[in-house]
Image (spheres, grey):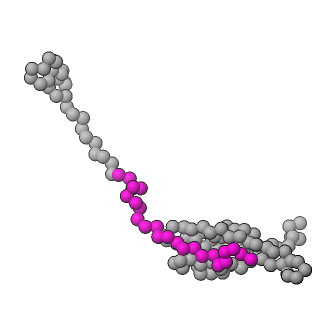
Amino acid sequence: MDAFKPTPPTVQVQLDSIPSGADAKTSAGPACKTPCSIGVPASDFSVTFTLNKFLPATIPVQVISVPADVTTPASTSIDPNPVVAELQPAGPVPKSARKPPPKPKQPKPAAAAAPAGSPFPPPPAAR
């Protein structure tokens, strides 16, 4: 019976990134490398932009359908359109996020002899 259901309408959306060349993947499935234009099903979705040495960015997108009335035909618009992500450099790992080097193990101190004139007897010798 699914064969008789109408195909959901698609909308074209322009995707871009700063810097360009990012991989843009929609939550609806289609993907491309920016700048590009793709068709997606006419329902809300998000676009995730990824590029080496940059932090990923996800932009939510709303599909707005305006029903027809007596004076205007039905229309569909996308907000935002074009979808543009300004990617931030990943940068070096902050010092606070780095693990400190392991501390070297220090040998246990040997038993010290009691100081002269101590009221305590010297410790027993190890065999």
Q: Nearer the viewer, residue 48 or 110?
A: 48
Residue for point 66% across, 70% down: 26
Foreground: 39 or 107? 39
Residue 49 visible in the current orientation: yes
Extreme residue toward the left, this view: 116
Horizontal side of residue 90 vs 65, given as left or right: left
Q: In this view of the protein, which residue sits in the foreground, 109 or 127?
A: 109
The relative height of residue 85 versus residue 93 in the rendered view (above or below) is: below
The answer to which of 102 and 86 lies nearer the viewer is 86
Q: Is residue 86 magenta?
A: yes
**The quadrant where residue 118 appears:** top left
Q: Can the viewer see residue 29?
A: no
Percent position of residue 56, x then y? 54, 67
Q: Residues in magenta?
A: 77-100
Residue located 86% across and 67% down the image: 2
The outermost residue toward the front is 71
Q: Quadrant of residue 67?
A: bottom right
Whether residue 78 is in magenta: the answer is yes
At horizontal 14% and vertical 24% (from top left) the residue drawn is 114
Left or right of 92 on screen, residue 42: right
| Vertical position of residue 26 compared to residue 111: above or below | below
Horizontal side of residue 28 vs 66, given as left or right: left
Tell how many labels: 0
* Residue at 37% across, 58% down: 95
Q: Position of residue 29 (x, y in %)?
A: 68, 70
Image height check: is 9 above or below 56? below
The C terminus lies in which quarter of the figure?
A: top left
Q: Residue 25: percent from the left, percent from the top? A: 63, 71
